[in-house]
Image (spheres, rainbow, N blue to C red):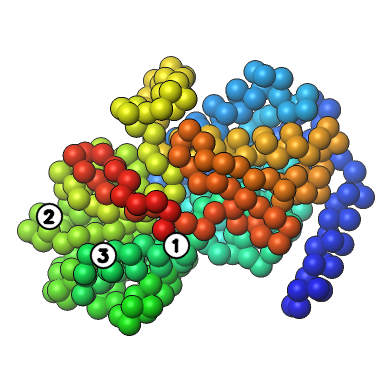
């Protein structure tokens, strides 16, 4: 569609939203938010801290008087990382709970199944944990993203790794779904810019636990760098298998494997793993004063150590609160969109990137940083790669 027609369509859409009056999920006293997380499935170790981080920030806002006099109420449903279950959860959040916006829906398979339902219902789809290009393109007034797309950051990361470390035989192990295919596009693009191509690639089904066949295949191919489109549990399983058979090949995992749980579960097997960070891990040791205070409050609240997923959940809720406050007391979907399109942030105590949105760009950040597990913790090796 030509840009003038697209913009005209967006203006009409927003005008319609203004005319509809009070938005679903917004009353004089309350704003209802929805989120679909994996709380019991293969990625629950990520979904639970995302939920906890969001709830912490929301409760802080409510304790300070809410947003323009309204309390925030977050309703979280468990998808167990199953798209079919996620569809049922989304329907419930749309129809029964009347969620004004959906925050941080977790996992590309879940997002691909539920995002059309959400935007078709006229609800905001904000900052999902799926760096898939469809979460921000084509431009749509209800879709916003802050996580750098797999294609963009993997293209930059793979190119940086090969250029600086001299790998000659790069290979890919990927989850056989939209997530894995998006990563593959970025890897292919990064290698292509250097006149190279993948030597081997192999896939696995979501939820797999045995990677012996895939590791054997990649080892036979003589890979000197293995790129992983995996999440935490699968990352640990792949590296453990490689080390068990005596194969010390370098591996690079996407941001989906960048988590403290990776080194906590993997121990010595994951030492040396490279990863992409979209936000540094909130370790207490060496933290700045604001981060140290946040860690203390998180520990006190949950009796557990925070991780990068906790921090991202907190940051997502904070972005919503900033935009909703800027939208004013007469909160509507259109007013929120207008406020968010003018929102610009600076790096905060987490070390997050600066986020910026506009009327013609709903992707707040396009870059990731290279990190590596050294001495049982992630260390940042670069600034945001471009």
The x, y position of residue 174, in whole percent, is: 34, 65
Taking the image as drawn, is residue 363 in sight? yes
Measuring 15% from the left and 43% from the top, which residue is drawn there?
Answer: 268
Name the residue that disc number 2 marks.
243
Left or right of 268? Residue 365 is: right
Depth-wise, is mark 3 or mark 2 nearer the camera?
3
Label 3 with label 2: CB-CB less than 8 Å? no
The C terminus lies in which quarter of the figure? bottom left
Q: Residue furthest bottom?
A: 195
How far separated are the C-alphas under marks 1 and 2? 32 Å
Depth-wise, is mark 1 or mark 2 nearer the camera?
1
Point out the tag, 1 or 2, that comes first from the N-terminus. 2
The x, y position of residue 280, in whole percent, is: 40, 41
Name the residue that disc number 3 marks.
164
Measuring 12% from the left and 58% from the top, which residue is drawn there?
Answer: 248
Name the residue that disc number 1 marks.
386
How far separated are the C-alphas under marks 3 and 1? 14 Å
The x, y position of residue 227, in whole percent, is: 29, 64
Measuring 47% from the left and 56% from the top, which residue is drawn there?
Answer: 367
Is residue 364 shown above or below 228? above
Figure quadrant of residue 303 = top left
Q: Residues within 10 Å of mark 1 (few under 14, many from 20)?
A: some
The x, y position of residue 100, in whole percent, is: 73, 42
Is residue 329 shown above or below 367? above
Secondary structure under tag 1 reads loop
Name the mark on residue 316.
Answer: none
């Amino acid at each position: 569609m030509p840009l003038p027609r697209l913009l005209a369509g967006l203006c009409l859409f927003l005008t319609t939203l203004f005319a509809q009056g009070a938005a679903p999920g917004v009353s004089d006293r309350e704003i209802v938010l929805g989120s679909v997380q994996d709380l019991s499935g293969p990625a629950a170790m990520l979904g639970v801290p995302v939920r906890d981080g969001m709830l912490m920030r929301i409760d802080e806002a409510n304790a300070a008087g809410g947003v323009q006099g309204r309390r925030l109420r977050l309703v979280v449903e468990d998808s167990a990382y199953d798209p079919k279950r996620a569809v049922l959860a989304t329907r419930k959040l749309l129809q029964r709970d009347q969620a004004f916006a959906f925050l941080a829906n977790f996992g590309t398979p879940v997002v691909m199944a539920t995002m059309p339902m959400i935007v078709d219902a006229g609800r905001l789809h904000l900052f999902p944990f799926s760096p898939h290009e469809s979460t921000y393109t084509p431009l749509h007034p209800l879709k916003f993203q802050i996580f750098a797309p797999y294609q963009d950051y993997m293209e930059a990361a793979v190119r940086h790794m090969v250029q600086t470390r001299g790998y000659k035989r790069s290979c890919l192990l990927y989850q056989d779904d939209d997530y894995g295919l998006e990563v593959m596009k970025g890897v292919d693009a990064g290698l292509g810019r250097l006149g190279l191509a993948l030597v081997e690639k192999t896939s696995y089904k979501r939820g797999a636990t045995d990677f012996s066949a895939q590791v054997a295949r990649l080892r036979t191919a003589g890979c000197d760098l293995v790129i992983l489109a995996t999440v935490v549990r699968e990352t640990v399983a792949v590296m453990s298998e490689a080390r068990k058979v005596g194969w010390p090949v370098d591996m690079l995992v996407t941001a989906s494997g960048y988590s403290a749980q990776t080194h906590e579960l993997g121990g010595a097997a994951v030492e040396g793993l490279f990863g992409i960070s979209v936000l540094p891990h909130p370790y207490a040791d060496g933290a700045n004063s604001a981060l140290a205070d946040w860690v203390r409050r998180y520990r006190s609240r949950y009796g557990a150590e925070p991780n990068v997923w906790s921090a991202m959940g907190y940051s997502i809720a904070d972005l919503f609160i900033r935009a909703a406050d800027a939208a004013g007391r007469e909160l509507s979907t259109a007013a929120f969109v207008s406020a968010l399109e003018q929102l610009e942030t600076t790096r905060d105590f987490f070390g997050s990137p600066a986020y910026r949105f506009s009327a013609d760009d709903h992707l707040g950040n396009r870059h990731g940083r290279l990190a590596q597990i050294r001495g049982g913790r992630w260390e940042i090796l670069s600034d945001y790669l471009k």
